Amino acid sequence: MLQVNYIRENREKVLERLSVRNFKQPELVDEIIKIDEERRSTQTSLDSISAEANAAAKQVGDLMRAGKKEEAEAIKVQTTTCKENIKSLTEKLTELEKAQFNLLVLLPNLPHDLVKPGTTPEENEVVLVNGEPAQLPKDAKPHWELATKYDIIDFELGVKITGAGFPVYKGKGARLQRALINFFLDEAIAAGYKEVQVPHLVNAASGFGTGQLPDKEGQMYHSTVDDLYLIPTAEVPVTNLYRDVILKEDELPIKNTAYTPCFRREAGSYGSHVRGLNRLHQFDKVELVQVTHPDKSYETLEDMSTYVQSLLQKLGLHYRVLRLCGGDMGFGSAMTYDMETWSASQERWLEVSSVSNVETFQSNRSKIRFKGKEGKAQLAHTLNGSALALPRIVASILENYQTENGIKIPEVLVKYTGFDMID
C-alpha cells in the first residue's frame, strides 16, 4: 500500500508511474489527496478543541480546589459544547480515514524507474538469454505425453479425485518431485537462507498484509466457515512472520526459504497453453523471502535473480530473463524479473520463476519496520521469489532431457532421486 504522505508530496510522479502500469483509475490519486486534506484539517480542529477542553478541565480542578464551586460549574457548562464537537469531529475523522483507506488499497505499487510501459507479455524486456536449446529426438513429445508414456503423472486420476488442475504424481514422478524440493531447499540453505515451515492456511489479515487481499480474492480458495484462505504461495505466511514487528537494523537482511504446496483458482484459464503441468490449481514450490534495508533492496533483487539463475544452470536448462513491463507486473511489485525455460516440444517459453522487489508496499500494510541508529522506526523493503516452482521445471526436465531410451535425470538430482533415468 502506498504511503499517503508520498502521494501528496509527489502527485505528478505517482501519476506518471501509474501510467507505466496502464492503470485505469488515475482519478483515485486526486480523490485520496482531497480526502487527506479534509482529514488533516479535521484532525487539526479536533486537536485544538481537545486542547481547549483539557485546559478547561484543568481550570475547573483549580477552581474547585480554591473553593470557587460556582465558577467551576459555569465553566463545566461551557465545556459541554466542546465535548459535543469532539464527538462529532472524532466520528468525521473515522469516516474520512476509512474512506481514504478504501481508496488506497485500490492503488497498485509504483513501478521502478527502470520498468518500461507496456500492457502485454510481448512488451517485456529480455535482459539475458543463457545456453542453447536442447537437441531432441525427431519424435520429441510434450511432457503430458511423456508423463503418460512412462506412467509418472496421472492427470485423469486427479480429475477423478478432485478436478482438472490437480495431477497425481506416481513412482519416479513422485520421487522427482521430492528430489527437486530437497535440492532447492538445500541450495537455499547453502546460500544463507533459513528454512521455515509455515501454515498452508492464512487469515484475512495475512492476505491483506502481502497484497493478495482484496486484489486477488477471487483467485484464492476460501474456507468460509473459518474465514481462512489456502495460500497461493509461501510468500504470504513467511512475510507475515514479521507483521507488526519492529526489527533492529543489524538484523537485516532477513533471509527465509520455505517449501509449501500452493493453491490457485486460476479462474478463466483455458486452452492449450494451460495443458498438462503448464497451469495447475495445486502445485509445489520453494519460495525465497527477504526483508531488507531500503538502501539495499535493488542490490538484493539482483542477487536473488542471479541465485535463481544458478539453479537453472545447475539443472542444465536453457533459459532467459525478462524484466516485466508495467502492465504485466503483479499488483504489489515495483520491479519483477521472470525466468523462463525453453520448451522445444511446445515451441514456447515457460515461466518457471518470478523474483520481485515490492519495496514498502507490503511492509506498509503489515507494519514491518526496523530501527536504525537514530532510534526512529522506518519501513523495511520486502522481496520474494520462486526458487523454484515445480510444475514447469518438471515439464522442462521431461521435455528437454528426453531421449530415444527414456528421460535422463539432471546430474545434480541423481543423489536425490536415486536413479538417473526414467524408462
Image (cartoon, helix red, strand yellow):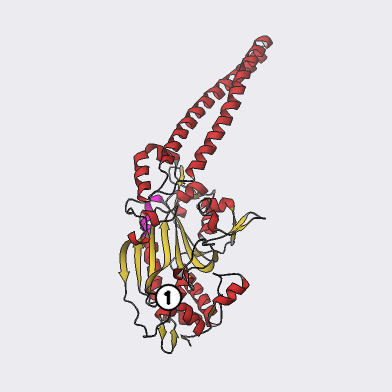
Q: Position of residue 195 (x, y in %)?
A: 52, 65
Compared to residue 372, the image places residue 221 above or below, namely below
In the shown orientation, is residue 375 left or right of residue 306? right
- Which residue appears at 39% of the width and 78% of the height? 345
Residue 367 visible from this viewpoint: no
Near-viewer residue (112 or 400): 400
Whether residue 78 is situated above or below residue 300 in the rendered picture: above
Residue at 54% over, 26% down:
46
57 or 321, which is in the foreground? 321
- Label 1 Cα crowd, 10 Å radius (few <14 / some 14-19 / many 20+): many
Depth check: 83 or 407 in front?
Answer: 407
> Does the image show residue 131?
yes
Is 245 displayed left or right of 29 in the figure?
A: right
Q: Residue at x 63, y 14 (%)?
A: 75
Q: Amino acid at mark 1?
A: Ser
Q: Main secondary structure of the magenta part?
A: helix
In the picture, measured across the screen, residue 22 lies left or right of residue 167, that is left
The answer to which quarter of the image holds residue 125 is bottom left
Query: Does the segment drawn in magenta span residue 299?
Result: yes
Q: Which residue is mark 1?
A: 396
Q: Position of residue 65 (x, y in %)?
A: 66, 15
Q: Quadrant of residue 240?
A: bottom right
Q: Count numbered badges in the picture.
A: 1
x and y, in percent, of residue 183 in the image: 47, 74
Residue pushed farthest bottom? Answer: 405
Which span is picked out in magenta?
294-301
In what element is the residue under mark 1?
helix
Above or below, comparing residue 61 to residue 283 in the picture: above
Q: Is residue 120 magenta?
A: no
Residue 254 in percent (x, y) is at 47, 57
